[in-house]
């Protein structure tokens, strides 16, 4: 089994040496300057001139020099490979040479991806380095692409076995030698050509792994609509191939830098959006559309995501993948873990697995296995986990794309949610065994663990699926949907229309729906768990949108509020990300809900507990301001209701009493405005601006807006910064008008009116910001830089 690098370019002609070659040889004795050969080859590789290939040397010279430099005969083999790979060759000898080169490089690749991976300098892996330096990469690219050349109307052909050897060598060179992958990524025609090699099962894994590495460093995203016969290619994949292909798709359908989307400033995003509008759809959007146009694509992904372990591929097929250790999933790291556990379980179960040496196979192409070969259950599970996390990622990205409604409809139709519900206990949230598989060098609690990655990807999918979409009720079973109806009936309020419209044949089955299962594991999660953030986000997305009393009560009855307060107050959570997700969830759970505030007051039943809660809120308003906003809005609604139950809560609830005080609101308002600026606004902290606007909007409705603005002015002067806060707020509101009113963002009529009044340029208006900024400190006409 071999793996080595590839390179592209045109071969130097045989026969007379070129002028460049003669010059490089130094002009004396027909011999290159010994000390400068590698340096000259390196220079030629960078410039494309001078010495670039083994064919520019004589075999005698290379053999003589090899004795001193210990090049393992690689330059001579490349010289022979060049000679035997001409257009009219039958490639038999060519393939024999490749099999000589292959083990020289595969051993270095094995060392690189295991514990011996201590140094990564080029000289640490001399064989792959010499192979690339003497033009091996370029030569293999030429050989692989020979089928694109026609002679007298006939396409040239090379065998799958030879393609496999070339791909293996190329991959090993990419692994060990810096810069090779990037050079290949620049050859767009070669990258597109690689996709065509995936039509053969024999070369699929090698091709897919090489493509994945190349796309990972490619500066510009490839367009799938340029791949010849993409629909036919994907449709002919078996389920294993499709799962592996999802690793490639993950790179091609995700917008670049989306991982830090919350950290990008809104100014920069606005500039990017303007640029994107002029350029049309992005490559990622084009690729998503190309995939969705393939018949049955989403349906097959749903089947893969919900397939049970017992339905997965048989032993022989799986062992064939393991034979290609360097191409399978996360390469030798995963294989190392799999083999270790396989040996452990084999000792316990008296079942043997014979892992053949790399490359060993029978006539049918499958590895040798004993008659009693039995695949350990843990290995089967890991197999499915590694597949499913890639498939779930692709589905998640499609759910967030332009065709979201189309994808939503298909995912519901193909019963992804009930399928995941059936896998929840046995696979997705299964209990770790003593020998639970993890990646080499990691532990079970590391975020790199496949088990943990699958859980996080699952939670992200639930978040995307539930967010502002009526299909969220598919997360429940029939009994739980009936419970929602009963809650609405008891409260004498109309039943949620989306609940009535839910297709009962598509919901979860069993005793519990997916949402309920999630709540159960959420409440059992250890304090230090990295899942808390994602669990809270997934549940919060179920509540987002129009506030539903029935939805809130469904979760309140299951103890969610008490669990959140325990985490915030009693465990005194320190993680900012987790705190923010819990505060956001608490705000959605309590918004306008009297019962929730009663439960809050019952749990936070001492001044000491309440002070801990306030300390957590005030520790970072960027994290807690959504809760502040929800409580402020709820207080306003309760104060305008005539109801004994509401009156009782207003008189007893510590939190409502605290928020109702003007000094409290002014303290929040001052800090919320002070911690953000137009140049630092992001998707994460823009909520601070919206919360400050809500406070002033409600003050205006109570005819207190001038009072609040005067108090802000006094607070500015007390801090010795006259004009600083109000100028900043004026700029923020101008940006708010641009970002929300001109981009179809959610905003209420009352908010729009309040912003217009605050930005009124009339200095005589008691509700205009400019009336409270003294002339010497006025700075409100600053242009926003978007570059």
Image (cartoon, rainbow, N blue to C red):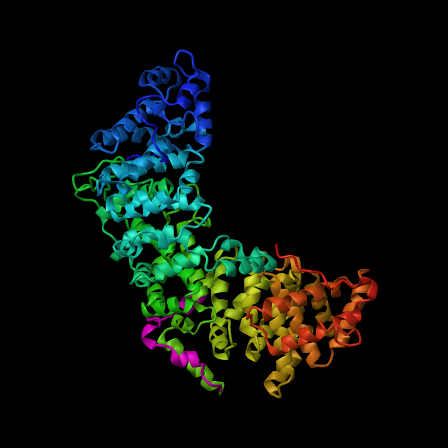
Q: Is residue 61 shown left or right of residue 584? A: left
Q: Is residue 7 shown left or right of residue 148? A: right
The N terminus sits in image quarter: top left
What stretch of residues is rendered in magenta? 493-519
The C terminus sits in image quarter: bottom right
The answer, for residue 565, to whether it is visible in the render is no
Q: Nearer the viewer, residue 475 or 243?
A: 243
Q: Residue 715: image x %, image y %?
A: 79, 66
- Residue at x 30% of width, y 45% of height: 205
Q: Is residue 605 shown left or right of residue 335? A: right
Q: Is residue 498 magenta?
A: yes
Q: Residue 666: image x %, image y %?
A: 73, 70
- Residue at x 42% of width, y 78% of height: 498
Q: Residue 243: image x %, image y %?
A: 32, 53
- Residue at x 68% of width, y 81% of height: 701
Q: Is residue 217 magenta?
A: no
Which image quadrant for residue 473? bottom left
């Amino acid at each position: 089994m071999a793996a080595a690098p590839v390179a592209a370019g045109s071969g130097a002609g045989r026969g007379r040496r070129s002028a460049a070659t003669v010059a490089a040889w130094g002009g004396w004795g027909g011999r290159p300057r010994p000390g400068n050969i590698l340096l000259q080859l390196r220079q030629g590789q960078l410039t494309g001139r001078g010495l670039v290939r083994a064919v520019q040397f004589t075999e005698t010279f290379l053999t003589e020099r090899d004795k001193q430099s210990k090049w393992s005969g690689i330059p001579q083999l490349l010289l022979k490979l060049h000679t035997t790979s001409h257009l009219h060759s039958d490639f038999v000898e060519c393939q024999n040479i490749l099999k000589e080169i292959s083990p020289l490089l595969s051993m270095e690749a094995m060392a690189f991806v295991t514990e011996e991976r201590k140094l990564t300098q080029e000289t640490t892996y001399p064989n792959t380095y010499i192979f690339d330096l003497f033009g091996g990469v370029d030569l293999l690219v030429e050989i692989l692409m020979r089928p694109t050349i026609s002679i007298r109307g006939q396409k040239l052909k090379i065998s799958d076995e030879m393609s496999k050897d070339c791909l293996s060598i190329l991959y090993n060179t990419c692994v060990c030698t810096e810069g090779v992958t990037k050079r290949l990524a620049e050859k767009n025609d070669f990258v597109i050509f690689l996709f065509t090699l995936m039509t053969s099962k024999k070369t699929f894994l090698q091709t897919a792994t090489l493509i994945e590495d190349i796309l990972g460093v490619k500066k510009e995203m490839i367009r799938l609509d340029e791949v010849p016969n993409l629909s036919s290619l994907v449709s002919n994949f078996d389920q294993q191939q499709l799962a592996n292909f999802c690793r490639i798709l993950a790179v091609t359908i995700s917008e670049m830098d989306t991982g830090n989307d919350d950290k990008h400033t809104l100014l920069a995003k606005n500039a990017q959006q303007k640029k994107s509008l002029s350029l049309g759809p992005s490559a990622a959007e084009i690729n998503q559309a190309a995939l969705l146009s393939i018949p049955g694509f989403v349906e097959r992904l749903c089947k893969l995501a919900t397939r049970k372990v017992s339905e997965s591929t048989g032993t022989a097929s799986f062992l064939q993948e393991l034979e290609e250790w360097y191409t399978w999933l996360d390469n030798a790291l995963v294989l190392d873990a799999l083999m270790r556990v396989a040996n452990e379980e084999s000792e316990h179960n008296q079942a043997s697995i014979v892992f053949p040496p790399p490359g060993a196979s029978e006539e049918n192409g499958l590895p040798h296995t004993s008659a009693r070969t039995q695949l350990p259950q843990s290995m089967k599970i890991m197999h499915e986990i590694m597949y499913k996390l890639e498939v779930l990622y692709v589905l998640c990205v499609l759910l967030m794309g332009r065709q979201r409604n189309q994808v939503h409809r298909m995912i519901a139709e193909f019963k992804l949610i009930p399928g995941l519900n059936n896998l929840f206990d046995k696979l997705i949230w299964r209990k770790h065994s003593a020998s639970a598989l993890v990646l080499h060098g990691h532990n079970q609690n590391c975020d790199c663990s496949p088990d943990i990655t699958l859980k996080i990807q699952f939670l992200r999918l639930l978040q995307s699926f539930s967010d502002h979409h009526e299909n969220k009720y598919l997360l429940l079973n029939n009994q739980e949907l009936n419970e929602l109806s009963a809650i609405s009936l008891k409260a004498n309020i109309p039943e949620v229309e989306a609940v009535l419209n839910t297709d009962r044949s598509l919901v979860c089955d069993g005793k519990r729906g997916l949402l309920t299962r999630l709540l159960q594991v959420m409440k059992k999660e250890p304090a230090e768990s990295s899942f808390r953030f994602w669990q809270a986000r997934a549940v919060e997305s179920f509540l987002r949108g129009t506030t539903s009393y029935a939805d809130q009560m469904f979760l309140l009855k299951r103890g969610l509020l008490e669990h959140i307060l325990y985490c915030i107050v009693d465990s005194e959570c320190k993680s900012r990300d987790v705190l923010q997700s819990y505060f956001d969830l608490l705000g959605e759970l309590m918004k306008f809900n009297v019962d929730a505030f009663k439960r809050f007051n019952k749990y936070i039943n001492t001044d000491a507990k309440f002070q801990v809660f306030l300390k957590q809120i005030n520790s970072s308003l960027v994290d807690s301001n959504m809760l502040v906003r929800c409580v402020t809005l709820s207080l306003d609604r309760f104060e305008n209701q005539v109801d004994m139950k509401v009156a009782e809560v207003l008189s007893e609830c510590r939190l409502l009493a605290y928020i109702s005080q003007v000094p409290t609101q002014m303290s929040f308002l001052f800090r919320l405005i002070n911690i953000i600026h137009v140049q630092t606004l992001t998707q994460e902290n823009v909520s601070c601006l919206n919360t400050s606007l809500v406070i002033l909007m409600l003050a205006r409705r109570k005819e207190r807006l001038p009072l609040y603005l005067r108090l802000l002015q006094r607070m500015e002067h007390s801090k010795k910064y006259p004009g600083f806060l109000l100028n900043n707020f004026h700029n923020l509101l101008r940006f708010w008008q641009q970002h929300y009113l001109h981009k179809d963002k959610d905003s209420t009529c009352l908010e729009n009116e309040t912003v217009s009044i605050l930005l009124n340029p009339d200095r005589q208006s008691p509700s205009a910001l400019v009336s409270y900024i003294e002339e010497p400190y006025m700075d409100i006409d600053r242009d926003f830089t978007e570059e």
